[in-house]
Amino acid sequence: MIKIMNKIALSTLTILAAVLMVAGGTGAFFGDTEQSSGNTFAAGVIDLKVDNESYYNGNKCADVDLTAGENWQWVGQSEYPEPGTSCSTSWNPDDLSNGRSFFNFTDVKPDDEGEDTISLHVGTNDAWACMDMSLTSNDDLSSNEPELGDGDVQEDINNTWDGELAQNLQFAWWADDGDNVYEVGENGLYEGVKTLDTLLNHGSSSWSVALADSAHNVWTPNTFTPLSAGETHYIAKAWCMGTLTPSPITQDNATTSGPQVRGTGFICNGEELDNTTQSDKATLDVTFRVFQSRDVEDFVCGDTPRLAHVTVIKQVVNDNGGNNVIADFQLFLDNGIVTTNVTSGASTTVASGVYTVNEEGIPGYVASFSGDCDAEGNITLADGDNKTCTITNNDLPANITLFKQVINNNGGTAGPTLFGLRVDGGLVPHNTSVSVTPNTPHTISETGRVGYSFVSMVGMSSYGKPCPAVLGGAITLDEGETIVCTITNDDNLPG
């Protein structure tokens, strides 16, 4: 599954001012009045809007109902993605912080391919533009028989870099003219075709490209000009699960149809792939940055920190008999839009913003946060930050409560405190919780009382385990697990 979280920074400022000047007075003399009204200063706008047009196996994610509001569906002749089903990878001009994802494909298979064209709109001022990407995970989510049969290793729940999908997804990016087709003479954003893993360097650093700064322009490589206000600027990307080969189509200056008629300008071949990528997931962050070009003639994209780095460290304290380890806890970052799995102790590159560090772990442990996280696991990452957050999980003891129920229907008078309830041979008060070591068998019994017979022992633990059925039986509880066992005795028939 490929998921991408996207973020842009935007700012809009308008200042209005009016000046009224009047001259006049009283008396018998000639006069004149001149008035200048509505003097105004209005700030221009640098407000980046981004839209996307997405194709997958030749089917287009299109708005099929232009009159009754947006209704995005796959349209085309390919069997998958199924025509008529909903899609989310195309949209009209919007802020990426509204949860827009260039990729959200959850069932990618060898030979699958796609093309996307991104449109950039910068408002009323010319602007320099930069794009940054980072690989945030390349995770093997599970291990099935076909994967293991082709040499894959068993999935490690805490290792978010044990997948093979990023190594087998190939990408090409280029400056497009708006027809979604790679044509002769269009400029690549980098040389040739690269795998996602190679492009983003195993997640240890980002890939950054100057779309338009004082030293680069991907649309006009010989003229380093900013993005023009009021114009739409296009960059495109093609991807393939397999081998992606450029096959540029004759340039038509965006006057004819796009991929569903002419193809993307690339050939995809996934015949050489095996099963090792099954159940894998790769996630990415994409960031666009724009800056007013007026009065900043020497701006270079590389001069500004682009992304942030965060390291989440897991610590497990087993001082009450717990037996779980770091690998049993899946760590992740969440920014309210997307969840990114992370590996304990490994630096992860993400877009700046506010995140919550959390985990999917084992019950019976109490978690606490330290380092750059607050007490609830929240962390704020600015551009260029390198922060660390530690989650410590401390195991809880297990607890057993023995409750005595006495049936006195034959003249008996004994109460519940007189039967010598025991856990591991030690006396336990009636209806009182006692702490025990988890992951260890504990025997439940009683001394008993003359004139009374054992009837039953019943109860269910907080994790669904039953009490032993007989006196002297044992139960093993997990960390933090609790159980109440009711032991019933009946006075004997008169003899």
Image: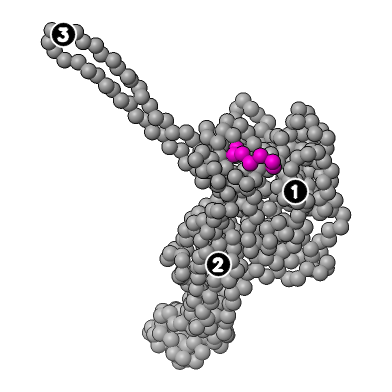
Q: Position of residue 126 (x, y in %)?
A: 55, 36
How far is disc 2 from disc 1 in space, using C-alphas?
Answer: 30 Å
Nearer mark to the viewer, of 2 and 1: 1
Q: Residue at x 86, y 57 (%)?
A: 272
Q: Principal SS element in the magenta part?
A: loop
Q: Residue furthest right?
A: 271
Left or right: residue 377 compared with residue 215: left
Reply above or below: 296 against 42: below
Q: Position of residue 31 (x, y in %)?
A: 21, 10
Q: Residue furthest front?
A: 30
Q: Earlier in the sequence, mark 2 or mark 1?
A: 1
Q: Residues within 10 Å of mark 3 (few under 14, many from 20)?
A: few
The numbered mark at residue 311 is 2
The disc labelled 1 sits on which kind of residue?
Ala
Left or right: residue 423 compared with residue 41: right
Reply above or below: 67 against 123: above
Chain part drawn in magenta: 221-227
How far is disc 1 from disc 3 in space, using C-alphas?
Answer: 81 Å
- Disc 3 is placed on an element classified as loop
Q: Residue at x 59, y 66 (%)?
A: 347
The disc labelled 2 sits on which kind of residue?
Thr
Which residue position holds label 3? 29
- Disc 1 is placed on an element classified as strand
The numbered mark at residue 172 is 1
Whether residue 298 appears in this view of the structure is: yes
Nearer mark to the viewer, of 3 and 2: 3
Q: Are marks 1 and 3 in contact (CB under 8 Å)?
A: no
Q: Are marks 3 and 2 in contact (CB under 8 Å)?
A: no
**Which residue is nearer to you in this view: 279 or 288?**
288
- Disc 2 is placed on an element classified as strand
Q: Residue at x 51, y 38 (%)?
A: 294
Q: Position of residue 75 (x, y in %)?
A: 74, 35
